[in-house]
Image (cartoon, grey):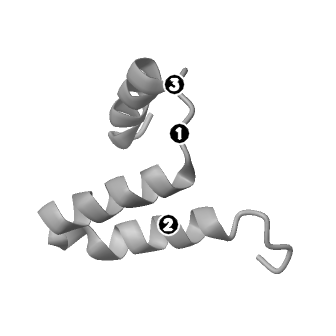
Amino acid sequence: MYFTDRGIEELEGRRGEEEVPLAWVAERLREFVDLNPDFETPIERFATWLARLDDEDD
């Protein structure tokens, strides 16, 4: 188990039953980066990865 799995498990446990629009998730990611600018690159990479999950080229 990776260290980050604990946070993912907490997210799933607390909010796993919720359904939210991706626009809401995008806004939360923007807020997170505004508060934590050092994480701009990893968040950008994560958002790009999510956006391209269905691309056949990848």
Q: Quadrant of residue 29?
A: bottom left
**Left or right: 58 as drawn, with respect to 37:** right
Residue 12, label in figure: none
**Is residue 15 depicted above or below 58 in this figure?**
above
Task: Give the vertical position of 37 relative to 8 (above or below).
Answer: below
Picture coordinates of residue 19, whole percent (x, y): 57, 32
Question: Dot 1 surroundings within 10 Å: few (below 14), some, or many (20 or more)?
Answer: few
First-in-chain label (3 vs 2): 3
Residue sitting at x 17%, y 72%: 37
Image quadrant for the N terminus? top left
Rendered view: 2 above or below 22: above
Q: Which residue is mark 2?
A: 47
- Residue 40: image location, x then y, percent: 28, 73
* Secondary structure at numbered mark 3: loop
**Mark 3 vs mark 1, CA separation in Å:** 10 Å
**Mark 2 Cα-neighbour bin, 10 Å: few <14, some 14–19, many ≥20:** some
Residue furthest left in the image: 35
In the rendered structure, are the residues bearing label 3 and label 1 in contact, judged by CB atoms less than 8 Å apart? no
**Residue 39: image x %, image y %?**
25, 67
Q: Are marks 3 and 2 in contact (CB under 8 Å)?
A: no
Q: Amino acid at mark 3?
A: Gly
Q: Residue at x 51, y 24 (%)?
A: 16
Image quadrant of residue 38? Answer: bottom left
Query: From the viewer's perspective, is the residue at label 2 or at label 1 nearer?
Result: 1
Q: Amino acid at mark 1?
A: Val
Give the side of residue 27 with respect to residue 52, left or right.
Answer: left
Q: Please identify the quadrant where the C terminus is shown.
A: bottom right
Residue 16 is marked as 3
Instruction: Give the quadrant of residue 34.
Output: bottom left
Report, in whole angstroms, how far the alpha carbon at label 2 lies from the one at label 1.
16 Å
Instruction: Provide the residue designation for mark 1.
Output: 20
Task: Provide the secondary structure element on which disc 2 rests.
Answer: helix
